[in-house]
């Protein structure tokens, strides 16, 4: 296996890992190269233009093509853009202030990210008790769905990141977005293009797969 150019490092807590050289990140020349080098964007670097209608459809088509035991479709998508996104950003700011009285809004509010990213896609988890399929398996499917969405957007050359934070847990945000009783937010996906004025993208430390893998033998 050809090694990709990288820097080997040890974290402060002693974990071994490596970072790929920036120039090889998100190599879209073929599928395996992409998967080996895929890197999310940091939301501050996500700017217009967003995906066009066709790209957005393809991103959601890929997200809906996700392993799903029992064909339960335990996920759905809410696309937020344009004026609706501005409205949501205003709502988030006001709600954050109500939850944090006397505090100055900081980066945890994320309203500025919602404003800047051209498209926000909320992946809603709608898992439910089922006679055969455990809720845990449905949750795994929702995570896989989020991953497919981010990978599809990034594979198109767009910039995307999966986020959560307070807004993915707040009942008032759920109500604002029209979530049902059994629904929750699995991810708030920011999608756009890499801001050319943003600092160049860097990798984050990745584990060596060898450190995570054992070869089982009978008697182990
Ligand atoms: C469920 C979930 C929630 C996340 N929420 C956040 C978040 O709120 N803020 C953040 O900076 N990264 C968050 N991340 C991490 C990023 O999405 C991403 O994993 C990280 O930036 C590294 O990305 P990459 O491996 O795709 O390059 C979250 C990841 C997951 C799986």
Image (cartoon, rainbow, N blue to C red):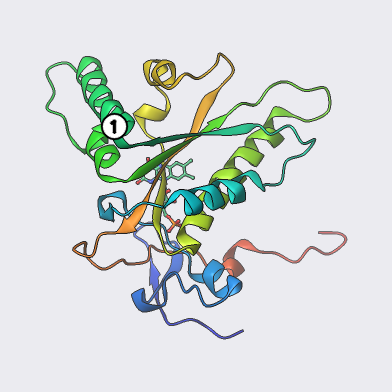
User: Outermost residue toward the right?
Assistant: 218
Looking at the rendering, in which quadrant would you find the N terminus?
bottom right
Does residue 85 appear left or right of residue 143 in this picture? Answer: left
Task: Say which element carries label 1.
Answer: helix
Looking at the rendering, in which quadrant would you find the C terminus?
bottom right
Count of numbered circles on the image: 1
Does residue 37 appear left or right of residue 209 in this picture? Answer: left
The picture places residue 142, in percent across and down from the top left corner, at 61, 38
Q: Is residue 61 above or below residue 95?
A: below
The picture places residue 8, in percent across and down from the top left corner, at 41, 75
Write the residue at 60% across / 51% down. Answer: 62
Does residue 180 appear left or right of residue 102 in this picture? Answer: right
**Tag 1 residue:** 83
The picture places residue 83, in percent across and down from the top left corner, at 29, 32
Nearest the viewer among 210 and 136 is 136
Nearest the viewer among 63 and 214 is 63
Nearest the viewer among 140 and 52 is 52
User: Outermost residue toward the front?
Assistant: 53
Q: Is residue 156 above or below residue 130?
A: below
Judge: label 1 CB < 8 Å from ligand 1.
Answer: no
Q: Is residue 134 above or below residue 41?
A: above
């Amino acid at each position: 296996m050809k090694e990709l150019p990288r820097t080997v490092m040890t974290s402060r807590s002693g974990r071994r890992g490596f970072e790929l050289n920036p120039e090889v990140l998100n190599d879209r020349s073929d599928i395996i190269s992409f998967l080996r080098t895929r890197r999310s964007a940091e939301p501050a670097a996500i700017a217009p233009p967003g995906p066009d209608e066709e790209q957005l459809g393809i991103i959601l088509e890929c997200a809906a093509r996700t392993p799903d035991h029992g064909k339960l479709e335990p996920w759905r998508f809410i696309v937020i853009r344009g004026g609706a996104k501005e409205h949501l950003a205003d709502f988030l700011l006001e709600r954050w202030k109500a939850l944090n009285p006397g505090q100055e809004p900081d980066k945890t509010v994320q309203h500025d990210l919602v404003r800047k990213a051209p498209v926000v896609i909320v992946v809603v988890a709608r898992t439910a008790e089922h006679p055969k399929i455990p809720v845990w398996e449905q949750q795994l499917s929702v995570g896989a769905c989020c991953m497919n969405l981010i990978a599809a957007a990034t594979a198109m050359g767009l910039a995307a990141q999966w986020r959560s934070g307070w807004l993915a847990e707040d009942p008032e945000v759920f109500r604002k977005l029209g979530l049902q009783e059994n629904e929750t937010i699995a991810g708030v996906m920011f999608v756009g293009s890499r801001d050319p004025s943003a600092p160049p993208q860097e990798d984050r430390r990745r584990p060596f797969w060898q450190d995570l893998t054992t070869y089982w033998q009978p008697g182990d």
